[in-house]
Structure formats: structure tokens, C-alpha cells
Image (cartoon, rainbow, N blue to C red):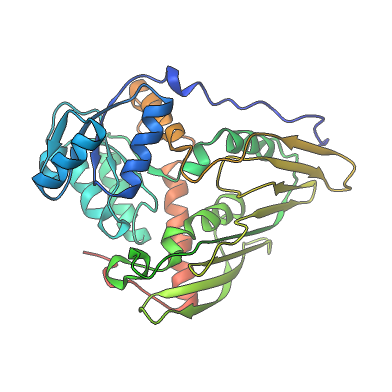
């Protein structure tokens, strides 16, 4: 494969041109607010209803965000026939119950990442969605960004050759009152932060044949940080670390026999990257302003709208089998470093 002379353009359509769907928001927490703000600023999607655990909370949220209908229970929300799709925005320990509830009610679903606590839960959701012919996707928003569309084209072209190693990490600082320190909510950084680097390993290297790792426990009863090294069937390596104790560069490098990808800012956010030939003689740059955290959530909403309007039941940006593969690798990480969750299954 000859190394390219230029990078391909992004194929992501204008989000403003996506067919307009009526969205129900299941959950009234922080990520729901980020989603609504992003979607309203950059698309024509209609936020039609909010569902929360109480009528007072739902009404207050609806007033704050000018949402037409407020439902005081999640059951009432998924029973709203004026919806085309439900966005599940509750904590991840509740995703399995809420996604199954929405699918049983005949609703298409976009569920916040991670889709589930473990692979078995994710299989339940995917099996039901496929049996009912309903749309289901995991909102791992990074893979809906224009920069990842360009990167996917580079990878699919074979320009990087065989991927020999992937190096990636993600760390943030959290105050002690954050839910990430709560064992009852499947706390610790792996599912909140680690989904990004683990998804990159899974996507680029495939299943792990071997894995070694270490973790450090936090006094709150969750894992505070961990690191793993994995090898796929060919012996190629992936290295991942995640921590809740402080901000890290959140960077990544993809090393292939034909070239290397280096990110110019956080790999999981909007921002630039470079593709460098193996001999270093050619450097191709993808340029875009570095984005704020969750600024690009509207791309996933627009993609979901296009898919549902076309009759598709999943998106090629984040195929369900890719989500299942990531969940399987997350299970392997937990088994390797030695921890479980208080509520791995209901």
C-alpha cells in the first residue's frame, strides 16, 4: 500500500440537514442537559418529552429546557406515542432496565455509554432490539465525530499497514461527592472514562488473547485507577490506563507497519491529528479546533435521525457488534485486575 499524499475529507453530512425526529429524554441528570444543549444548538431535532422519577423533577426540567411534555415516571415516557426515539441518559447501572423498558414499549433507543455494566446485559438489549426490529445504538459520541470518519477512512485504506500497537489513556479529577466514588452505582473510572481507551483497543486490535494489569483501590470501595496491557491473536499490543485522581493528556497513538497516528489534543474530543509515514518523511495533518467536552454530542443525534428515517436498525458509526466486543473486553479487564460490581445483573 502506497502511503497517501493527502487525507480524505469527512463524509459526515450537515447535522442541520438530518431528518427531524421527536426525542424523549429518559433521565434528567447532567448528561441529559449536555445532550439537549448540543442538539438544539446544532440540529433541528425536536426534544419532545422528558421523563424523570418524579413529576416535580420532570416539570422543573421541562420548564428549564422548554420541553413540551413532562412525564413523572420512565414508564410514562416510553409509553408516549408522540416519540420517534428515546435517549437513555440515566447512570450506567440502570441502563439495562431502562433500555429493555423502552424496547418493550416499541421505542427506538440511543443509550449513553457504556451500553451496560457487562457483556451479558448488552447481549440482552441487542437481542431484544434485533428481535423487535428496533433501532439501538450506544452513544459513544467520539466515533460520530468528523475526525473519526476521516481516521476510519485512513484505516480502511490500509495506509497504516498492520496495527502493531495502540497506546491510550484517560484520567479526570472528581470531587468526593461524585457518583463515580459510589460502589452502588458501579463507580470507578473504568466504565465512565475507560470506555474510550478500551473501545479504541477493541476497535483497532480486535479480541484480546492475553491481558495483564494492575489496579489501585480507593477507600470509597471502588477502583481508583488501573492499567492493562493486552495482546491480540497476532501478538500486537494495546496499552490502556485510566484514573479518577487527576487530569491526564487523554491522548492516543496508533502504530502500524506503514505509519503512525498521533492526536494533537484529547483523542476522544474534536481536535487535530497527524498521520505520519513509517519513515517519517510524510506527515498528513487533519485540522479542526479542539472541542470542549461533550460539545459534539449533536453528531450522534443527527446520525441516529438519519438511520431511523431510512429504516436502519443500527449505525455503521457504532455497530452493535462493536459495542458487544468492547463490553467483552471491559469484562476481561475487570477479571484481569480483579473487581466486580455490586449490581452486575439485576
Count all numbered tags in the image, as a single digit: 0
Residue drawn at (33%, 25%) of the image: 45
Residue 93 at x, y = what percent? 29, 60
Q: Residue at x 36, y 26 (%)?
A: 305
Q: Quadrant of residue 307?
A: top left
Q: Locate residue 252 relative to residue 120 in the image: left or right.
A: right
Whole-percent x, y for residue 44 in the image: 36, 21
How far across and how far down the image is residue 30, in percent? 33, 49
* Residue 81, percent from left and from top: 14, 28
Q: Nearer the viewer, residue 41 or 202?
A: 41
Q: Based on the displayed image, in which of its 4 quarters is residue 78 positioned?
A: top left
Task: Work out whether 116 lies above or below 231.
Answer: above
In the picture, the quarter occupied by the N terminus is: top right
Residue that sits furthest to the bottom in the current view: 219
Q: Does 284 appear above or below 120? A: above
Say which residue appears at 34% left-offset and 56% top-offset.
Answer: 116
Q: Is residue 149 left or right of residue 75?
A: right
Q: Quadrant of the C terminus?
A: bottom left
Left or right of 206: which side holds 278? Answer: right
Quadrant position of residue 220: bottom left
Front residue of 261 and 42: 42
Residue at horizontal 36 percent and vertical 67 percent from the top: 187
Above or below residue 186? Residue 150 is above
Amino acid at each position: 500500500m502506497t502511503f497517501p499524499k493527502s487525507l480524505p475529507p469527512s463524509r459526515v453530512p450537515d447535522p442541520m440537514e438530518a431528518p427531524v425526529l421527536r426525542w424523549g429524554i429518559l433521565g434528567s441528570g447532567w448528561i441529559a442537559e449536555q445532550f439537549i444543549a448540543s442538539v438544539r444548538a446544532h440540529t433541528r431535532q425536536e426534544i419532545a418529552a422528558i421523563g424523570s422519577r418524579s413529576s416535580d423533577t420532570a416539570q422543573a426540567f421541562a420548564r428549564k429546557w422548554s420541553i413540551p411534555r413532562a412525564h413523572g415516571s420512565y414508564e410514562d415516557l416510553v409509553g408516549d406515542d408522540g416519540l420517534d426515539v428515546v435517549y437513555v441518559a440515566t447512570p450506567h447501572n440502570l441502563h439495562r432496565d431502562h433500555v429493555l423498558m423502552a424496547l418493550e414499549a416499541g421505542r427506538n433507543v440511543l443509550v449513553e455509554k457504556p451500553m451496560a455494566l457487562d457483556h451479558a446485559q448488552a447481549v440482552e438489549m441487542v437481542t431484544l432490539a434485533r428481535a423487535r426490529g428496533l433501532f439501538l445504538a450506544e452513544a459513544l459520541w467520539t466515533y460520530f465525530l468528523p475526525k473519526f470518519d476521516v481516521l476510519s477512512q485512513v484505516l480502511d485504506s490500509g495506509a497504516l499497514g498492520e496495527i502493531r500497537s495502540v497506546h491510550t489513556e484517560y484520567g479526570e479529577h472528581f470531587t468526593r461527592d461524585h457518583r463515580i466514588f459510589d460502589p452502588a452505582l458501579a463507580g470507578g473510572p473504568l466504565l465512565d472514562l475507560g470506555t474510550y481507551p478500551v473501545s479504541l483497543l477493541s476497535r483497532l486490535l480486535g479480541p484480546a488473547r492475553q491481558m495483564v494489569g494492575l489496579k489501585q483501590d480507593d477507600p470509597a470501595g471502588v477502583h481508583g485507577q488501573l492499567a492493562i496491557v493486552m495482546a491480540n491473536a497476532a501478538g500486537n499490543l494495546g496499552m490502556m490506563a485510566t484514573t479518577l485522581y487527576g487530569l491526564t493528556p487523554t491522548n492516543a497513538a496508533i502504530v502500524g507497519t506503514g505509519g503512525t497516528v498521533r492526536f494533537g489534543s484529547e483523542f476522544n474530543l474534536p481536535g487535530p491529528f497527524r498521520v505520519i509515514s513509517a519513515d517519517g518523511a510524510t506527515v498528513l495533518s487533519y485540522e479542526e479546533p479542539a472541542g470542549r467536552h461533550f460539545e459534539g454530542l449533536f453528531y450522534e443525534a443527527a446520525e441516529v435521525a438519519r438511520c431511523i428515517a431510512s429504516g436502519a436498525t443500527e449505525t455503521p458509526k457504532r455497530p452493535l457488534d462493536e459495542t458487544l466486543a468492547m463490553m467483552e473486553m471491559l469484562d476481561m479487564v475487570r477479571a484481569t485486575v480483579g473487581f466486580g460490581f455490586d449490581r452486575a445483573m439485576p
